[in-house]
Image (cartoon, rainbow, N blue to C red):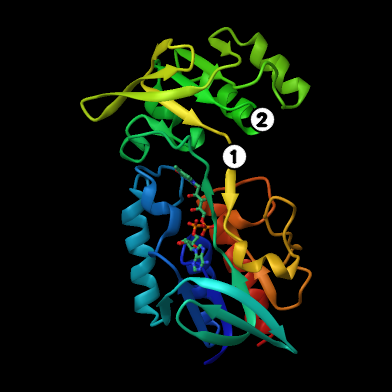
Amino acid sequence: MKYDSIIIGMGVAGISAAIYAKRAGNNVLIIEKERPGGILNIIDNIENYPGFKKISGPDLSYQLFEQVNELKIPYKIEEVIDITLKNEWKIIKTKNAIYECKNILIATGRSPILLGLPKEEELMGKGISTCALCDGALYKEKRVAVVGGGNSALQEALFLSKIVKKLYLIHRRDEFRAESELISKIKATENIEIIYNSQVTNYIEKNGSLAGVLLNDDKTLEIEGLFIFIGYAPKTDFAKQLNITNPVGYIEVDENYETKIPGIYAAGDIIIKKVYQIVTAAAEGATAAIRFSRKK
Ligand SMILES: Cc1cc2nc3c(=O)[nH]c(=O)nc-3n(C[C@H](O)[C@H](O)[C@H](O)COP(=O)(O)OP(=O)(O)OC[C@H]3O[C@@H](n4cnc5c(N)ncnc54)[C@H](O)[C@@H]3O)c2cc1C
């Protein structure tokens, strides 16, 4: 089957792109491996997306999906496993079929790396979080811990320290691998206590919510929130052979969100950028689609 453009991923970046492409008269297809909304489906509460004072991730996903259906944008629930190039055509292979198009937008997102401990999934949104900007306000004047030792863990810890009463920063090594300026700020923050050479080994649950964590020295920390920042894994395995990713798998794009391969675009959490938010993902998807829709 041949299309003008194919969007891989039905998260906010992919849906935003599809809306613009379809309205520009593009013969567009979305391919999504799981469900509409992507990572929005695991977000309890969103309070910073314009137009919605407060909305749950699943509700926003539903509204986005309704827009896809209203515009009659075709989609397939299939996993993309390979992309190859044939002259100006791009060949997309899924587990079920083969599709051809002139332009591809890769909007497959990334997953936060978790600790892999029992009950972790159940406690996500009930004490465990991977987004300080999103969930920090829920822990006003409470005791929380941050796990990690890189730039993002330290930045998020500083952000949270202004909201919470006490913050434990749990790091598995005896020194941080973050910028020295950040490390100095962390050390100078009164309500942050650094716990070096330490790892969370178990979660303590009470009435369905996180009540504490157990550390590898058998010490217990009584906390209501645990923020895990040990990295994200971009979902680009199917695109490795195209050589458009950096060594850790994020896609490099120009100001039009096009990769070094003409006709292959990328947007949202999958690209190398500074701000990983819903509003940026939507804007990037739209910008890419406006660009490739004009080329059709
Ligand atoms: C816990 C948490 C809370 C957050 N809270 C907020 C918040 O309050 N406000 C805010 O602005 N941002 C928040 N964010 C960030 C925001 O959710 C993301 O930046 C944004 O949703 C990313 O959208 P995306 O479309 O790029 O990716 P995703 O939503 O991850 O969508 C990617 C889609 O691609 C699909 N896919 C992946 N691989 C394949 C494949 N091989 N074939 C087909 N489909 C594939 C996936 O199934 C998924 O549906 C939060 C993030 C997390 C983790």
- Residue, far top: 190
Q: Residue at x 36, y 38 (%)?
A: 124
Left or right: 198, with 255 as reference point: left
How many C-alpha atoms fall within 10 Å of the one at disc 1: few (<14), some, or many (≥20)?
some
Mark found first going from the N terminus, 1 or 2? 2
Left or right: 174, with 108 as reference point: right
| x and y percentages locating residue 207 in the rendered image | 20, 26
| x and y percentages locating residue 205 in the rendered image | 28, 25
- Determine which of the numbered discs, if any, sits on residue 65 in the image: none
How many C-alpha atoms fall within 10 Å of the one at disc 2: few (<14), some, or many (≥20)?
some
Q: Are marks 1 and 2 in contact (CB under 8 Å)?
A: yes
Visible residue check, residue 177: yes
Q: Is residue 196 above or below residue 272?
A: above
Q: Residue at x 37, y 28 (%)?
A: 138
| x and y percentages locating residue 290 in the rendered image | 63, 75
Total number of numbered discs in the rendering = 2
Q: Is residue 163 above or below residue 134?
A: above
- Residue, far left: 207
> Which quadrant would the C terminus be assigned to in this image?
bottom right
Spatial CA span between label 1 and label 2: 9 Å
Visible residue check, residue 257: no
Instruction: Describe the element under mark 2 as helix, strand or loop.
Output: loop
- Along the viewing direction, whichever of 224 and 99 lies nearer the viewer: 99
Residue type at tag 2: Gly
The image quadrant of residue 88 is: bottom right
- Determine which of the numbered discs, if any, sits on residue 231 in the image: 1
Left or right: 28, with 54 as reference point: right
Instruction: Describe the element under mark 1 as helix, strand or loop.
Output: loop
Q: Residue at x 51, y 15 (%)?
A: 168
Question: Which residue is under mark 2?
Answer: 150
| x and y percentages locating residue 292 in the rendered image | 66, 78
